[in-house]
Image (cartoon, rainbow, N blue to C red):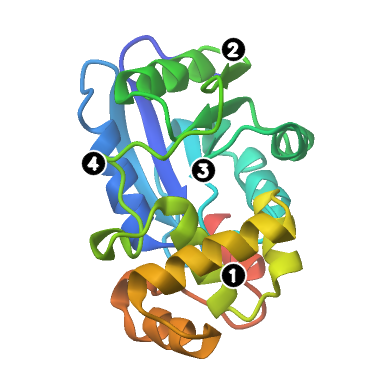
Amino acid sequence: MVVPTRTVSVAAVNDYELIVVGLSRLLSQFPDQLEVRERIVLGRTPLRNPVDVALYDTYGRVGIDDALRELVEHELIGAVAMFTLDLNERIVADARRAGAAGYISKALPARAIADAIVAVAHGETVMAGTPSPSPALDALDWPGKTDGLSERESQVLVLAAQGLTNREIAAALYLSPETIKGYLSQVFSKLGFRNRVQASSYVHRSSEFTRLEPDGGQMTAARAHMR
């Protein structure tokens, strides 16, 4: 790993453009520490320049292992940090097995997030979380935020719209099926939906929820772009 001597160069990475833009805007508040050099939408945007840290936002992902491994193995990336809502033992264990060096909570203050990225760039293994699960930092963006959805509710909704069952969503988000059922109920109440059909229609007609679905599999296409 090349240890940065000045500002740390960062790639903001996710499957959704809105998430990447919001994350980039947050990190750009700290030009004394960070340079957002790349904004990567997996499967769509190739990584063109070397970066010290790729910050991978787990929003919308069913299984983080493949995405993290792709980033860890990329020759232009010095280190990889996972950016997620809850740092529970299971998601951290999966990220560690995939080779991530940082595990950063979205609930942290913005400066603490920046400090954690700098520490990862300097070769530290960083666990930067909150004492208990908390809402995502409001400075971040996510689909449905303007309609009153929390990030967790948005995550549950987007996975439900992909056709996943409550049990499958629970596995993807490292939660229980009953917890997922509760979040869906909150989403339906906030948006005035009666069922998943209406919820899915809302997702598919909103540009905020647009996600690239490459032919032949998402990570296969991402690999072709990133090598």
Callout 4 environment at 10 Å: few (<14), some (14 to 19), or many (20+)?
A: some
Dot in front, 4 or 2: 4
Rendering coords of residue 49 (x, y %): 40, 42
Q: Please tell me which residue is depicted at 41% across the width and 49% down the height of the picture.
A: 48
Above or below: residue 18 compared with residue 138: below
Other-residue count near label 1 (Cα within 10 Å), few / some / many at <14 / 14–19 / ≥20: some
Who comes first in sequence, dot 3 or dot 1? 3
Can you identify the residue that label 2 sits on? Answer: 124
Q: Which mark is residue 73?
A: none
Dot 4: element: helix
**Label 2 crowding class (10 Å Cα cut-off): few <14, some 14-19, many 20+?**
some
Answer yes or no: do the residues labelled 1 and 4 have beta carbons within 8 Å? no
Which quarter of the picture shows residue 9? top left
Q: Nearer the viewer, mark 3 or mark 1?
A: 3
For the residues marked 3 and 1, what is the alpha-carbon distance in whole angstroms?
Answer: 17 Å
Q: What is the distance, in whole Å, between disc 4 and disc 3 at their CAs? A: 15 Å
Secondary element at tag 2: loop
Give the residue type that dot 4 points to: Arg
Judging by the rendered image, the residue that carries numbered circle 4 is 25
Q: CA gap, disc 3 to disc 2?
A: 17 Å
From the image, tell me which residue sits under label 1: 221
Write the residue at 51% across / 90% down: 197
198 shown above or below 28: below
Q: Which residue is mark 3?
A: 56
